Image (cartoon, coloured by chain):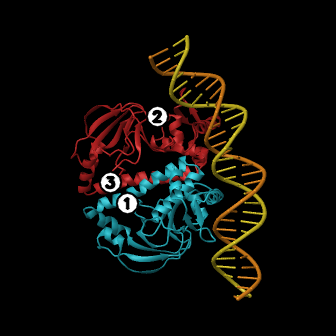
Chain colours: A red, B cyan, C yellow, D orange
Amino acid sequence: MLVRTNAASHRTNNGHLAALVGDQVFANEFSYGKGSEIFGEGDEPQYVYQIQSGAVRTYKMLPDGRRQINSFHLVGDMFGFETGPVNRFSAEAIIHTTVQIIRRRSLVDVVVKREGGTKGLINLVTRNLQHAENHMLLLGRKNAFEKVIAFLREMDERQNHPDVMMLPMNRRDIADYLGLTVETVARALSILRRQKMLRFEDAMQRKVVLLNRKILAALDV
Amino acid sequence: MLVRTNAASHRTNNGHLAALVGDQVFANEFSYGKGSEIFGEGDEPQYVYQIQSGAVRTYKMLPDGRRQINSFHLVGDMFGFETGPVNRFSAEAIIHTTVQIIRRRSLVDVVVKREGGTKGLINLVTRNLQHAENHMLLLGRKNAFEKVIAFLREMDERQNHPDVMMLPMNRRDIADYLGLTVETVARALSILRRQKMLRFEDAMQRKVVLLNRKILAALDV
DNA sequence: CGTCGCGTTGACAAGGTTCAAATTTGGTGG
DNA sequence: CCACCAAATTTGAACCTTGTCAACGCGACG
């Protein structure tokens, strides 16, 4: 809302988003610089987005600045349809990000007219709800270690268990996602590193290699 | 799932639930004893419910017994439609509860066929999602006092600011909803009582009178 | 080459949990 | 109807996990 928007570079393009609405509307490509706002809490929702490259965080803030990140959106993920007349949260590009967008009005109108489209849309919203339910369990009832392990496993899963997992977000993002402080996240990761559960490939500790997924799964309550 | 189900007493009846589906399906009344399970996590969803009287908790559990209550459902609330092929959480009657039910399959089929029904259903799911988002912020970023105050205000709001607010749930339920322990909840309530922000009407401290909604609102970040 | 952002680590503080006990209530059975 | 018992709530004290504050290292970048 009051954040700089480094938006730029758009061109026509059709993709997965278009598949949902049946190529009856145009999808444009749009790109956002690192840290720039895609939409703000309280704004009127204009578009629905699908990530082409990059990563996005959606979050809510308390008046004093405390932040809770609802979810991270990675390549291929759609977001922005899970809202009513005003956005209930904000979305920012974590790194340079390109998205496909279609106007929200077009999506809702078109999707409602099509058989199956309704179920598709409900399924999308339901997926978000499911994630939120799991995350409430994590936030309300898991300790710091369990939270960090769950985070690592979620990212590993969503990146299809790569040899080297790239974390686009910084420690503050992770902390605000897990309801912790950066220090606690760093400590948990350090302990996991010392226990040979993971290894960092780079200096800034963003490239993670999981060394024992089996034990990690066992530690994940 | 492995809990006794004191279900009993059903008769035909039409109400709000029926309004959503346009009286094309029958709604039955059903009743559940205090503490009895309405459906279990992992079950196949059979029905959609609307509460006639009583109160319901929906929750997820960790293997070791830690519990997170997603939401409380009060009179008039609907629940049970916010799920996929299997229930992602369990539902229990907090006190003796009567519900209207309709078969889920009927609901989805019928609702999808009707103009507006789709939006109605999406709105219902979206309302749940919105609640979950707010609750993630509470769980992840509010302290014990702020949580308890938010809880009191939510219940007050949902009961339309009654002079005497009846809490159907016990302290453990409140704690499991807020990600706290019973002791912390009791302490926070005691402090609010000593500060003349509220008063209990009954012995078991379930009937609450809010004595200063204005300050309470100010304390609610 | 200095500065800044990011991450880690250590020392300490504090909020919340755990453990224990007292009180009260409601239910149950005699 | 009364006595007894289980459950719910509150309160206190000790403890511990996590947060806070501070310092440091490192790489990026102007």
Q: Earlier in the sequence, mark 3 or mark 2?
A: 3
Query: Please, what is the three-letter code of the amino acid marked with disc 2?
Result: Pro
How busy is the neighbourhood of tag 1: few (under 14 within 10 Å), some, or many (20 plus)? some
Q: Position of residue A113 (x, y in %)?
A: 23, 56
How busy is the neighbourhood of tag 2: few (under 14 within 10 Å), some, or many (20 plus)? some
Is B211 displayed left or right of A23 in the figure? right
Query: Please, what is the three-letter code of the amino acid marked with disc 3?
Result: Gly
Task: Using the numbered discs, state the Cα–Cα distance from disc 3 to disc 2 in whole angstroms.
Answer: 29 Å
Picture quadrant of residue B187: bottom right
- Frontmost residue, B198 versus B48: B198
| Residue placed under numbered mark 3 in the picture | A120
Residue at 37% x, 52% y is A124
| Residue placed under numbered mark 2 in the picture | A168
| Residue placed under numbered mark 1 in the picture | B124
- Frontmost residue, C22 versus A33: C22
Q: Badges 2 and 1: C-beta atoms under 8 Å apart?
A: no
Looking at the rendered structure, whether the residues under marks 3 and 2 are on a common chain is answered as yes
- Frontmost residue, B71 versus B148: B148
Is A35 displayed left or right of A205 in the figure? left
